[in-house]
Each structure stands twice: as C-alpha cells, then as structure tokens.
Amino acid sequence: MERKMTSIIANRKTKSMVEKIAAIIFTCCAVVSIVAVVGITAYMFVSGTPAIFKVGLTEILFSNVWAPTAADPQYGILNIILTSIVGVFFAILIGVPIGILTAVNLAEIANPKVRNVVKSAVELLAGIPSVVYGLLGILIINPLMYQLELMIFAGSKTHQFTGGANLISAILVLAIMILPTLINITETSLKSVPDDYRKSSLALGASQMQTIFKVVLPAAKNGIMSAVVLGVGRAIGEAMAILLVAGNSVNFPLPFNSVRFLTTGIVSEMGYASGTHREVLFTIGLVLFVFILAINLILTFILKRGGEDGQ
Amino acid sequence: MKKFGALLLACVLSFSLVGCGNNGGGSDDAASGSGDVSGTVALNGSTSMEKLVNGLKEAIVETYPNLQLEPQFTGSSAGVEAVTNGTADIGDVSRALTDEEKAGGLVENIVALDGIAVVTDAANTATNLTTQQLKDIYTGKITNWSEVGGADQNIVVIGRESGSGTRDAFEEILDIADQCKLAQTLNETGAVAAAVQSTPGSIGYISLDALNDNVKALQLDGVAPSEETVKDGSYTLQRPFVMATKGEVSEQSAQVQAVFDFINSDAGQEVISSVGLVSAK
C-alpha cells in the first residue's frame, strides 16, 4: 500500500530540482556582494580620478592648502590625510591596551558574574550608533577639553581657541568606538588558545600572570593583530561621531587644533560642492578607499601567515 | 521551500514599498488667472541662488503648468554675462549690480534679500560689533572679547564649510573671501547654532530665519538683525538676490513676465520665505 504523496519535497525528481534552484539562488546572493564590491571599486576610480588629472596628484596629496572655493582654488589634502593617520594612530594607541586587557580579563580572569556584566557592556557599546558617540563627545569631552585648553593656553596670543573641538576629542571618541571590535576579536582568539598551553605553563610553576603574558597572549598573536587591523579600519572609516567633535577646520594635526579627517572632509562639504571641488571630494573618497584596501590586504596577509604558522 | 518562498515574497514586497514619493507640496494659491503662458525661460547665474531658483522652478508649474524654467548655476558674473549677450533671459546675481552693468542696459530686479545674523552664546556680555571688528574677528586679528567690549574671554570662531551659501554670502559681504580662520567649520546652520549655544565665548553666523532664542544675536554697527532692518537696509550684513533682465521687465517676453508675476504672487513669496530669505516687497 503506497501512501499518497502530498508533499512535493517527498518526490525525488522535484527534490533534485529544488536542490538545483536553491543552489542557483544562493549563488545569485553571493554574486550580489561581488557585484557591489566591483561596482564600488569601479565607481570610486571612475569618479575619483578626473580631479587627479585636472588638479594634479602631487598638488592634491602633498599640498596643505585647502581652499576649494577661492578665486584661485587650492585642493591640497595633506593636512587631512595626516589628521586621519595621526588620529587613528593615537586612537589605536589608547584603545589597544584597554581593549586587549579587557579581553584578557574576560577570557582568563573574570568570574562568570563580572564577565557577564562586562560582556553585555561591551556588546551594548558595539550597538550604539556612532552619532550618539558624537553627541556624548559634544556633551562631555568637548567642554572638558575647552577647560583644559583655557588652562594650557591661558594668555596665549597665537593659539586659536576651538571650544574643545579638537584632535584630542576626536581621538578619545575614536578610541572608545573601536573598543568593542578590539575586545570581541581578541577575546575570541584568546579563547581559541588550547587549554593545554595554560595547564602546561601553570604545571611548570608559572604564575597566572606569567602564563597570560608569556604563553596565552603570544599564542593568540595573530588574532590580536587582526583585531588591531580591524580596529584601524573602523577608526579610519568613522565619520559621523568625529564630525561632531573634531571642529572640522583644515589644520595640521596638533592636539588642540581643530582638525578635519578624510571622512569628515567628504561629509561636511558634499552638500553644496560643485565642479572640480566635488570631484576632489570623490578623490578624497578614493584615498580613503585605498587606505581601507591596504588595511584589508594587511589583514589577509596576517591571517594567511597565521594559517601557515598553525600547520 | 515554503519558507524560502515567503522570504522571497517579503523581499519583493519590501522593495515595492520603496518609491512612494511625495508629490510636491507647493501652494495652491495661484496668481491671477493666466495658466496659458507656455514655453521656457532660461536662467543663469549665482550658485547662492540655487535653492531659490529651484524652489521657484518647482512651484511655478502649479500656476503656469506649461512654463518651464531652465536654470544654470555658474556664478553671478557669468549670469550677468549670459543675460547681456542674450544666452539667458534672466541673470541670477547675488549682489547689487554695478553701475557699469546697469549702464550696459541691465535692470536690477531685486526679488529677495539674504540676511545673515551674527550670533554668540547667551551669556556673552558683548552686544555690538562694528563691521571692521567682525572682519577682524573672522580673520583672526581680534581673539578676545575684551577687545570689542565684552568680558576677558577668548573668541571661538565658528563658521560654515566651503560651498555653503551662507558662508559665501558672509565672506562676500564682508569682503573677506577665504581669509577666515575658523576654529570650527560646521556643515549646517543648525549645527552652528547648537555649537554657539553650548560654547562660551563663541561667535557664529546663521541665516536670519534660523535665529532663535537659544543664541544671542549681536548688533552690527548698532543695528539688530531682523526682517525689518534687513528690508530697510540699515542692517548691512545682507545681500540682494537680483534677477537681472536686459531692459525693464515690462519689455520682456510673456514668459519672463510670468516668472516675475509668479514671484510677486503669494505662492512666489512663500517660496522665498521657505528658503530662508526675506521678501524684497
């Protein structure tokens, strides 16, 4: 007695067809992201290069005068590039120790209760929209910086007071923003260090701290490196938060100067820019894109090396 | 498979929801009569007037459905050039015409006034600046409020980004184009107002219509900014938006006259105030 089949899935022929169609749909979905990457790359180069030919690559990259709407327009973004590099560097310098030590705490030391609290705080931190970080920066960091500025430069005739919107504010905001990235990836890599390592180290008489710093951290080196690189990527691509706290005037990146980053350079002037000015903004986008591309290549390189180490 | 289908359906539906635009909220208050004027009017000129002209372009079809404005934004001087040599019917000029230009046969039709308020934080004791002091503050020659009659407090100079119409107007009127040393360059009028409000000792400029009670408007040469003082010309931080024509408006084609009729109608005046300008009427 054969049961009557109502489900099409039970039929062998339709089953194999379903498999095939599903495979095709999955491939299509995968292609979407490839198309997006290729499209963005192509678009960035197509829209970013005309200004390079018009203005000249050295004029854009190595001049520090940004006066796009002057009668004799100048499109030098050297200060903007330097600001991005300096800002991200110091954000990493502040963020990495805090991030790694938090991760160590989470993965190695903390008891489950503390761990739960810290973990959910970090997760919340990761979920906060970047503009909220900016608002917090305006409300808390900028006034503090202004007080500091008034103290340090009291009586100065040459210093331009910025009201606390300066490079340090931006660095602090960035440093906090990259913490979740750093913590989560570092913690994962610490956890993937085999427990045998710890046990062996402890059995040989090393203290817990010795074990953490001499055994576990070195063993998780590659994971931590990729955390740092991803942190750099996040910091360099951030726009909204630092737009609110950095002051956005084009200046050499000194601690108490109002500065403009690559991202904020695009955001702040895109609204009304036209002609060559607009094209140069696209070139800034291209420069940013090249930075991100380089960071990703470094990341791939690190992960690949990590893979080889493991073999 | 069923789930998959549902997912696809959801995707398709969510896409189809996108694209419900709004169809223009222009005024239905039409100028007297004539919907029969048809054709195109070429405008050329100031980039500062882009918002105004585009606003007019969108709104005018409510009154004159067959009248098309064809604006280009190449700069005030290019606008003068274009209307002089006849490639444009109307030249948009965001400054008063020079005597030379008037002698060349152009007529200065002021359609709107663009006023800029200079603001500081509410606690600031300074109340008045001269034009020269304002220039010196923005070019970095004056750095303390005590030099202009305020308390001993540093000045935090806040301005707008390159390309902004307000910055353009501010620097053009004060004749300090690209000499400004800004401590903060913000990209919205609202952001300037907010930063001025929260930063002690700050100074910023915003278009007149954005003035609110959270910031303190400074007098310029003893005149407080307001719609009235802009209209009567006593407040000097303003510039006219001129739609120049070659010869009087009454000598122009029906299409060009229709444009001016529209600007003078209630609907046109509404456009002017909606883009933050003061009516010249």
Image (spheres, rainbow, N blue to C red):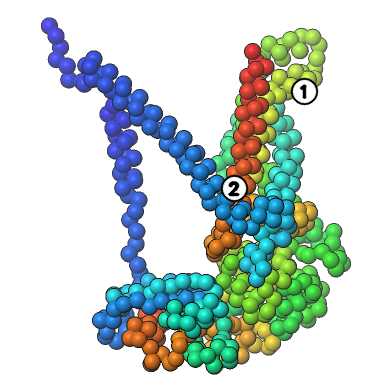
Is A157 placed left or right of B188 in the picture?
Answer: right
Q: Position of residue B162 (x, y in %)?
A: 62, 65
The residue pinned by badge 2 equals A286
Residue A8, picture quadrant: top left
The one nearer the camera, A232 or A6, is: A232
Extreme residue in the top direction: A1
- Answer above or below: position of A63 versus B195: above
Residue B232, picture quadrant: bottom right
Residue at screen point 63% across, 25% down: A303
The one nearer the camera, A143 or A258, is: A258
Label 1 sits on a secondary structure element that is helix
Amino acid at dot 1: Phe
- Answer above or below: position of B46 versus B11: below
The one nearer the camera, A82 or B154, is: A82
Amino acid at dot 2: Leu
Q: Position of residue A85 (x, y in %)?
A: 71, 45
The residue pinned by badge 1 equals A213
Extreme residue in the right direction: A155
Label 2 sits on a secondary structure element that is helix
